[in-house]
Amino acid sequence: MRIPADTGAELPRQLRERLSAILGARGVVEGDCSRYHESWGGSFTAPGGFVVRPGSTAEVAGTLAACAEARVAVVPQGGNTGLAGGAQPTRRGAVIVSLERMRALRAIDPVNDTITVEAGMTLAELQARAAEVDRLFPLSLASEGSCQIGGNLSTNAGGTQCLRYGNARAMALGLEVVLPDGQVWDGLRGLRKDATGYDLKQLFIGAEGTLGIITAAVLRLLPRPRDAATAFAAVPDPEAALRLLDHARRHLGESLTAFELMRHECLAWALVALGGTSPFAACHPWYVLIEATGQSAPGTLALPMEESMAAAIAEGIVSDATLAASETQRRRLWAMREGQAEAQKAAGPGIKHDVSVPVSAVPDFLARADAALAAAFPMIRPFAFGHLGDGNIHYNPLGPAGSTPAEVARLRPQVNRIVHDIVVDLGGSISAEHGLGQLRTHEIQRYKAPVERAMMAALKATFDPKGLMNPGKIVPD
Ligand code: ZN
């Protein structure tokens, strides 16, 4: 869909003039806004939206105050890589606030092990800034070159190292937030201990910009690993993968950093999309990518990694395994995992689920979901990968071979219902790391208890009584 360039016409002229006065020429996007209206991959397209790009916290505050007075909706936007449509307005007449110009490093304190950055800094730049002072910022996701830390915090992003370091929430010590009426909350405290009442920053993390806009954050830094050991193992089923996880934990202890599961189909399509060859001569039903990192001398972790594989092979739970002998080989193994977005594109239209269950329940979830879908839609093709170490599976079955995106889209509501009912029955979540956005906000009404929905609605009403912040996301309007 082509967006008309005159999106400004959606807004009252007075508000447009006021925003131009606050933000200046660089802060208002004239002409083609498709880059902001359409999400990465084109999954979500806004019906319009006037785009502003404030350059400072004061400009964000001015923008929100002006929009609140005019009663105009505001949709915050980071790197626009979200998979749930949280950064796209669902109606015309909204102001999209892109944080892309606010990407400054405000402070770095290697003694306190903290870094203070503005919300628009990309995750990759944040990792690089930490490395400059010999520290690690451990959040790591496929979109790290484009996604921004403000968006990562607003969706409580997870990624491939969550098993060891936790999700975005675990890395935040303090926030600066602009409230819906334009007030600025300076909560940029780099403290590990602060027992002075409600931990307000937690309300804004994972809130998808529905309570205010995160403009800066103080984040934890960690020691930068000097050693890494990476292995790729073939297993007969997810149950065996969990037993391998137990071996890996016993041999590698806290150095275990990633434990990623993928079906054979995911590896096969990644090889089609990216080229290359499988690490194994034979085909196996499931694969696991394991990585350990630590402060030991380079090469030290290879031994416990080999020992955990040998123990698992002896027990018959690993059919084959390979260890990366160089950084090039390590990158090659990771490419198969990180190339899953491309693999899915090559495989054809599918139906996505970003679910989590207790780690121990993952094999049960996969068996039940596969069986239920095979019974309801025999032509659907299995496709699943994810972060087995933390219980988060991207369960993305593909439509029947040769089906069009529209045909697959028609199956989506029923398939979502079948999969999500099983997830919730196992005590799981229907969005582990992608957020609710416009994709899951209505679905969650089925799965959250009335008391939980009431608390969420009460929070929303307290912070945003006019209902202007990212309307229709998280709390239905
Ligand atoms: Zn993921």
Image (tube, grey):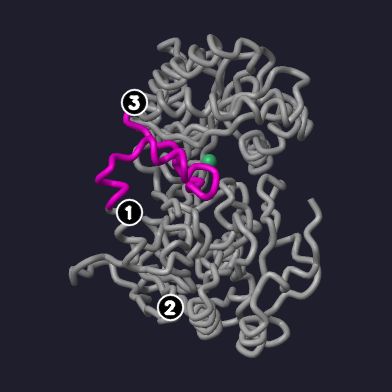
Of labels 1 and 2, earlier in sequence is: 2
Q: Amino acid at mark 1?
A: Met
Badge 2 density bin: few <14, some 14–19, many ≥20, Cα 10 Å: many
**Residue drawn 66% across and 26% down?**
267
Q: Which residues are magenta?
A: 427-454
Q: Position of residue 270 (x, y in %)?
A: 70, 30
Question: Is residue 353 found inside the magenta-colored segment of the image?
Answer: no
Residue 259 visible to an observer of this rendering: yes
| Above or below 417: residue 376 | above
Of labels 3 and 2, earlier in sequence is: 2
User: Which residue in the structure is indicated by mark 3?
Assistant: 426
Question: Is residue 434 found inside the magenta-colored segment of the image?
Answer: yes
Q: Amino acid at mark 2?
A: Asp
User: Which residue in the structure is indicated by mark 1?
Assistant: 456
Mark 1 element type: helix
Quadrant for residue 14, please give it.
bottom right
Apparent side of residue 192 relative to residue 410 in the rendered image (left or right):
left
Residue 181: mark in rendering:
2
Q: Amino acid at mark 3?
A: Leu
| 155, 473: nearer the viewer | 473
Are the residues flagged by discs 1 and 2 in contact, CB closer than 8 Å? no
Quadrant into which the C terminus falls = bottom left
**Mark 1 sits near ligand 1, with its Cβ under 8 Å away:** no
Q: CA distance from mark 1 to mark 3?
A: 23 Å
Apparent side of residue 278 relative to residue 82 in the rendered image (left or right):
right
Mark 3 element type: loop
